Every structure is written in C-alpha cells, then in structure tokens.
Image (spheres, rainbow, N blue to C red):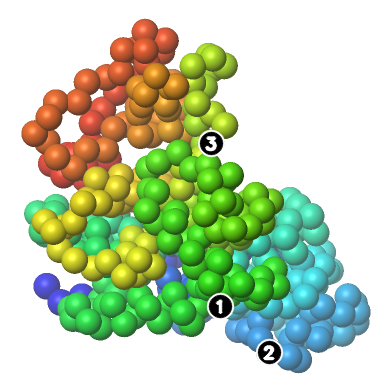
Amino acid sequence: MDLGDFMIKRYYENLEEYLKPNKALIILGPRRVGKTTLLKNFLKKTKLQYILDYGENLSTQRILSSQDFPQILEYARGYELIAIDEAQQIANIGMGLKILIDQVEGLSIIATGSSSFDLSQQIGEPLTGRKKTLILYPISQMELSEIYNRYELKQKLEEFLIFGSYPEVISSNNKNEKIDLLNEIINSYLFKDILALDNIKSSKTLLNLVKLLAFQIGQLVSLNELATQLGIDVKTVARYIDLLEKSFVIQSLGGFSRNLRNEVTSKQKYYFLDLGIRNAVISQFNPLDTRNDVGQLWENFIFIERQKKNSYTGFYGRTYFWRTYQGQEIDFVEDIENHLTGFEAKWSETKKVNEPSIWKETYSNSSFKVITPENYLDFIL
C-alpha cells in the first residue's frame, strides 16, 4: 500500500476535545512531525471565529511581547480562538497569552512549538493552571494501525527501524529520498534550532555528542566519559544533553531503585525519538542483516513506541531501567501505583530470557515480560 495516497490520521486529530475557554492548548513536538498540518486541519473544521498567526510574524512578535494591555486586547477583538504556530519565537509569549486568557472572556488559544526549552520556559509560570500540553511525536505504530493491519506492520518493521517515522519519510517509497529527507531535517531544522536556542558556538561538538549517544543506545552513559571524548567540561555536556532532550532529539531514562545498595541509579540511558534521525547522524542505512546494532535499534524502537502510546493514552505511571552493579538488568520498568512490570526487549528469540533472580527476589509481586518481534504489537498498540 502506498501511503502517498493516504492522510495519516493523528491521535490528536480532534483538538476540540482538548480546547477550553480561557485556557491555552500547547502542542509541542519536533519540527516536521505535523504540528502545523494538525492545526490547519482542525481550523478547517472548527466553527469558532479564529485567527491563525505565526511566531515569525514581526508584527505579532511586537504586539504579544509588549505587555501593552490595550494593544493586545485590540489584537484579539472579535475572535473566539487565537492559534499561533511556532509560538516560541515570540519573546515573553507566556505573559502575552496570560493577558489574553485573563482579559478576554471565552477566548481559547492554541500555541505550537518545536522546542520545549523555549516555549515551556516562557509559558510555565505565567500560564500555571491556564494550559494543557500535548506532545506530538513522529508517526506512531498506533496511528499506522489505522491504515495497516498487524501483518503489514510487521512486514514494514525493518523500514521503521532504519528510516524511522517522520511523516514525509514514511510517505516516501524511495530509499534515497528517505535519506535526503532525514538529512534535510537534521541539517535544516533540528541542529539549526538547537544551536540558536542557547547561543551554542560549536556545531561540530554538538554533532559529535549526538554521534556518541547514537552508539550508546541502551547503555549507561557517563557524562565524564563523554566530556573526555569531546574535550569539553562535564557541565557543558550536561547542558548540551538537556538541550537535545528539550528539542525532542533524545529522551532520557533513569534507573529504578528502592534504595538497595546494589541498584544503579546515578547514570542515565538515552534513546532517540526517531530512529531515522539516529541512523542519519551516523550515516548508517544498511539492511538489518548486515548490521551489528540491531539489538540497540530494537530496544530504542520498543521504548519510544511505548512512550508514544503512554503519552497519547494518558499513562500515569513512571518508566525506568533497572540494573545492578553485578550486571543483572531489565530494559524497562513501569511503576503504576507501586505495581512493577519489567520488560526486556529482545530482537533474537533463539535464546530464552529469564527474569533476573535479584529482581524476582526483591520485587516478588512484580511481573516480567519479554518483548520480541513476535509479540511487540501487543505492547505498543
């Protein structure tokens, strides 16, 4: 089936149910995942009197950053909904939105942003109690299951592991075009945005850091080791990683512990929000049967698809990894109201995976599951 003929329905297609008078709906996510398309599709259907504006509009920047009440209220006059795409480009946008929400009775607001660093920093305190935040990821397997059945999803699994799931990339049937699209996303959007965020001077250092993280999927990451390899200080590494996470390039995972001495909690693991981006960073698009990183790709894929599902369906637990200093480990642990479930992601099914003995002894009421290419859809759909 050629996806070019289909509009992929996003999980948040009906924004109406998240929209409330005198509240702001904030939609965050990486560039090019479809935030603008989602917004425009909603506006085509809404009966509300609206204006669609853009963060790069100099006039809008001037008005909404001014904190000039009469000017801001005049801007909103006659509208029931104000939608601002890439709102993080407007200085002090949080205060501008707060004025609108507090002063214009019945007004609803939608603001999108490609950097949680910029937008969340600006709206956090001013919009306390006045906002709802949604995160739009690259296309999820949940969303694709509306188009493909389970057999078809499994047939395309290798493609997802290599090229990821950005909308444009998924819609292309040409390998070279997919690679070109991924390289364009990296060079024209992701890193360009990050470099502008915090006045980072060395794009080469940032790229080298991302490459090092790309080779350490599923491993405990030492900031000291990264700093030594990059020739920079640990604080700079920590700041760069924080920016990468807030710009939706990577996602961190902390260690689980009930304060047992032999459980590792001082380090983090990092996964990429999109495997196409990860593979483009290291220029590795070879077929799976020629690669030595399939296990890492599989673990990353399972983690991020589960995160998409949990985010979209309102999962209220916490996710961790679990590892002891003796080397026993579980890839992911979900903690829901003190009930623990351990999940081990295994690409190869030739070797039986047993529940770690220390885990079983320490958390006797927990459960344990192995996620393989045979049963993974039950875990992420």
Distance in Å between CA atoms under marks 3 and 1: 28 Å
Task: Name the spot of residue 326 as percent of width and height, x first.
Answer: 39, 19
Disc 2 crowd rating (10 Å Cα; few below 14, some 14-19, many 20+) is few
Disc 3 and disc 1 in contact, CB within 8 angstroms: no
Name the side, left or right, on which 337 lies relative to 330: right
Task: Name the foreground residue: 67 vs 30.
Answer: 30
Q: Position of residue 26 (x, y in %)?
A: 61, 63
Toward which corner of the image does residue 131 lie, by quadrant?
Answer: bottom right
The residue that appears at 61% across and 72% down in the rendered structure is 202
Left or right relative to 291: residue 41: right
Which three-letter amino acid code belongs to the residue tagged 3?
Answer: Lys
Q: Which mark is residue 15?
A: none
- Residue 354's place in the image compared with 133, above or below, is above
3 or 1: tag closer to the N-terminus: 1
Instruction: Point out the tag, 2 or 1, that comes first from the N-terminus.
Output: 2
Please tell me how crowded label 1 is: few (under 14), some (14-19), or many (20+) other residues with Cα within 10 Å: few
Q: Secondary structure at mark 1?
A: helix
Residue type at mark 2?
Asn
Seen in the image, is 312 located left or right of residue 57? left
- Comparing marks 2 and 1, which lies closer to the viewer? 1
The residue tagged 3 is 267
Which residue bears the numbered disc 2?
A: 57
Alpha carbons under labels 2 and 3: distance apart: 42 Å
Circle number at residue 192: 1
Quarter of the picture containing the N terminus is bottom left
Residue 211 in which image quadrant: bottom left
